[in-house]
């Protein structure tokens, strides 16, 4: 069962509209994914992450990381320093084999600033789907991250999908991964953000032939909207 959430975050001359689907593995109530949407002094900030493991067993660590992220993210303006500070903060609670992938997205007018530590790259949805791979690969938190800042153009007619690997690593019965193809783009360009995520999930379920979800899945779809239209 996927929990839904929509939010509207003010930013300069516009608002950031969000739609979220959080789907823990195997019908669990909680899982190893984490996400948050925050208002900072400089603008909206989205955080998404994924701790090692999935389902109920991974939920306590995800909660620890999310609590630390919420505490740090509202006071640390620099997303690179935020990733490093979060790595330091959670180090005492990580086991020898634990790690956490992390993506921070800071929104400014016509731009998004990304810091990616081992997380699946977000998708920019425009005339085509574009995976926004970081210019420098960083390990996840807990494995010696080396975060860097990535600045990307993000216009009002575009959308940005932040997701965990439950999307791209979903397989059909033959072991083929879920494709980010023209059908996925069409789904993500639906008239509303809620419909876009529902259509994408329908494609995903058809691809896996409605098999039980083997991994946690979180989808966060964002689009800037002029204040007068919000």
Image (cartoon, rainbow, N blue to C red):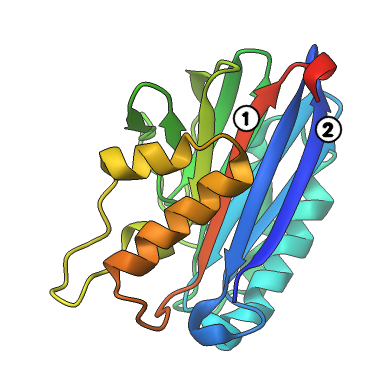
Find disc 2 in the rendering and name its residue. Answer: 40
How far from the left and from the top, in percent, is residue 192?
61, 38
Nearest the viewer among 91 and 69 is 69
Nearest the viewer among 192 and 94 is 192
In the rendered image, the vertical position of residue 134 relative to residue 73, given as above or below: above
Nearest the viewer among 21 and 100 is 21
Which residue corresponds to the image point at 44% horizontal and 51% vertical from the top-left? Answer: 119
Contact flag, marks 1 and 2 (Cβ < 8 Å): no
Which residue corresponds to the image point at 85% horizontal and 38% vertical from the top-left? Answer: 75
Q: Quadrant of the N terminus?
A: bottom right
Which residue corresponds to the image point at 58% horizontal and 26% vertical from the top-left? Answer: 113
Q: Quadrant of the C terminus?
A: top right
* Crowding at mark 1 (Cα within 10 Å: few <14, some 14-19, many 20+): many
In the image: residue 136, left or right of residue 178: right
How far from the left and from the top, in percent, is residue 148?
49, 32
First reached walking from the N terminus: tag 1 or tag 2? 2
Q: What is the CA distance from the residue labelled 1 to the residue labelled 2?
A: 17 Å
Res. 154 image quadrant: top right
Res. 224 image quadrant: top right
How far from the left and from the top, in percent, is residue 153?
50, 15
SS under mark 2: strand
SS under mark 1: strand
Q: Which mark is residue 166?
A: none
Confirm whether residue 102 shows in the render: no
Confirm whether residue 8 shows in the render: yes
Q: Residue furthest left?
A: 174
Res. 171 image quadrant: bottom left
In the image: residue 72, left or right of residue 152: right
Find disc 1 in the rendering and name its residue. Answer: 223
* Crowding at mark 2 (Cα within 10 Å: few <14, some 14-19, many 20+): some
How far from the left and from the top, in percent, is residue 175?
16, 72
């Amino acid at each position: 069962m996927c929990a839904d959430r929509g939010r509207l975050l003010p930013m300069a001359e516009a608002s950031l509209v969000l739609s979220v689907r959080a789907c823990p593995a195997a019908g669990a109530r909680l899982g190893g994914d984490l996400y948050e949407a925050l208002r900072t002094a400089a603008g909206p900030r989205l955080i998404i992450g994924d701790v090692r493991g999935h389902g109920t067993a991974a939920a306590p660590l995800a909660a620890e990381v999310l609590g630390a992220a919420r505490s740090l993210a509202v006071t640390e303006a620099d997303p690179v320093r935020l990733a490093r500070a979060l790595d330091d903060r959670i180090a005492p609670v990580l086991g020898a084999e634990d790690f956490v992938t992390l993506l921070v997205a800071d929104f400014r007018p016509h731009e998004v600033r990304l810091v990616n530590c081992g997380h699946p790259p977000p998708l920019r949805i425009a005339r085509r789907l574009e995976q926004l791979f970081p210019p420098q690969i960083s390990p996840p938190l807990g494995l010696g991250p080396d975060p860097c800042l990535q600045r990307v153009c993000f216009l009002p007619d575009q959308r940005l999908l932040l997701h965990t690997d439950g999307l791209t690593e979903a397989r059909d019965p033959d072991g083929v991964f879920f494709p980010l193809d023209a059908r996925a783009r069409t789904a993500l360009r639906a008239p509303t953000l809620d419909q876009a995520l529902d259509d994408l999930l329908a494609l995903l379920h058809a691809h896996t032939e409605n098999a039980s979800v083997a991994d946690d899945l979180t989808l966060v779809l964002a689009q800037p909207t002029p204040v007068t239209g919000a």
